[in-house]
């Protein structure tokens, strides 16, 4: 009657007999309050969910603990029972509940520089296109000083666009 096959996890090479097995976990569950299998805290830290097929002492977890665990591991699968977690929706806080972030003076200066640089780039490209194709700018295209400035602006625009593309590619 007690000859049940040993349960093993498909995800892990550990067997259930190495850590005390499911019988001890079920025994704990019967006599103790449920706790989160990640932070080992009870329902006082938040609602305990049963997000996978695990049973016994590893059955429950807090939503925030699970999301942090998934984020740190980079996997949406329970490492014990191989169940793929299904996160339906994450409720976003109302704007009045958002916490302010602190940024340094250097970061503020960098953000202002990016905004001003972007505005300059847009203005410069617009001017270059207007002066190249507008019938009102024919006299400018004939002037040597204009041609030098036109070349410099064009070169700087290409450098800025190239830098932006390089940063975008490196960040991905």
Image (cartoon, grey):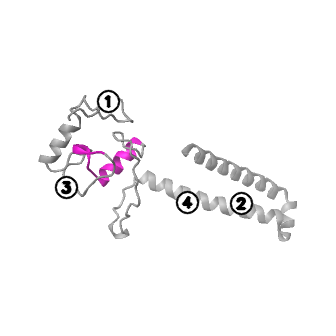
Q: Could you say whether the residue bearing mark 4 is in a helix, strand or loop?
A: helix
C-alpha span from label 1 to label 2: 62 Å
Residue depicted at x 83% and y 65%: 133
Q: CA distance from mark 4 to mark 3?
A: 47 Å
Q: Would you say 34 lies left or right of 15 here?
A: left
- Which secondary structure lies at badge 2? helix
Q: Position of residue 54 (x, y in %)?
A: 30, 45
From the image, state whether disc 1 or disc 2 is nearer to you: 1
Q: Quadrant of the C terminus?
A: top right
Query: Judging from the image, what secondary structure is the residue with disc 1 in?
Result: loop
Q: Please identify the residue farthest to the front as the structure is shown.
A: 1
Q: Is mark 4 in CB contact (under 8 Å) with mark 3?
A: no
The residue that label 3 is drawn on is 43
Please say if the residues under marks 4 and 2 sit with CB atoms less than 8 Å apart: no
Label number found at residue 5: none
Q: Which mark is first along the chain, 1 or 3?
A: 1
| Residue labelled with disc 1 | 14
Image check: 85 left or right of 136?
left
Q: Is residue 73 above or below residue 145?
A: above
Where is mark 2, residue-wise?
Answer: 125
Q: Position of residue 126 (x, y in %)?
A: 72, 64
Q: Position of residue 66 (x, y in %)?
A: 33, 49
Query: Which tag is nearer the camera, tag 1 or tag 4?
Result: 1
Q: Residues within 10 Å of mark 2 (few under 14, many from 20)?
A: some
Toward the left, the furthest residue is: 31
What separation in Å lies between label 4 and label 2 (alpha carbons)?
A: 16 Å
Residue depth check, mark 3 versus mark 2: number of the one nearer the observer: 3
Q: CA distance from mark 3 to mark 2?
A: 59 Å
| Mark 4 / mark 3, whichever is N-terminal | 3
Please state, as top left, top right, bottom left or bottom right, where the N terminus lies in the image: top left
Q: Which residues are magenta?
A: 54-73
Q: Which residue is mark 4?
A: 115
């Amino acid at each position: 009657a007690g000859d049940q096959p040993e349960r093993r996890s498909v995800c892990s090479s550990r067997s259930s007999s190495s850590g005390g097995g499911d019988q001890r976990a079920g025994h704990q569950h019967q006599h103790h309050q449920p706790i989160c299998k990640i932070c080992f805290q009870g329902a006082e830290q938040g609602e305990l969910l049963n997000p996978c097929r695990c049973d016994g002492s590893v059955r429950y977890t807090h939503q925030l603990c699970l999301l942090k665990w998934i984020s740190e591991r980079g996997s949406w699968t329970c490492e014990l029972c191989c169940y793929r977690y299904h996160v339906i929706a994450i409720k976003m806080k109302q704007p009045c509940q958002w916490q302010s972030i602190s940024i340094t003076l250097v970061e503020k200066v960098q953000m202002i520089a990016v905004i001003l640089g972007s505005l300059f780039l847009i203005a410069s490209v617009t001017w270059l296109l207007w002066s190249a194709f507008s019938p009102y700018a024919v006299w400018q295209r004939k002037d040597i000083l204009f041609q030098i400035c036109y070349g410099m602006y064009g070169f700087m625009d290409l450098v800025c666009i190239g830098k932006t593309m390089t940063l975008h590619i490196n960040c991905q």
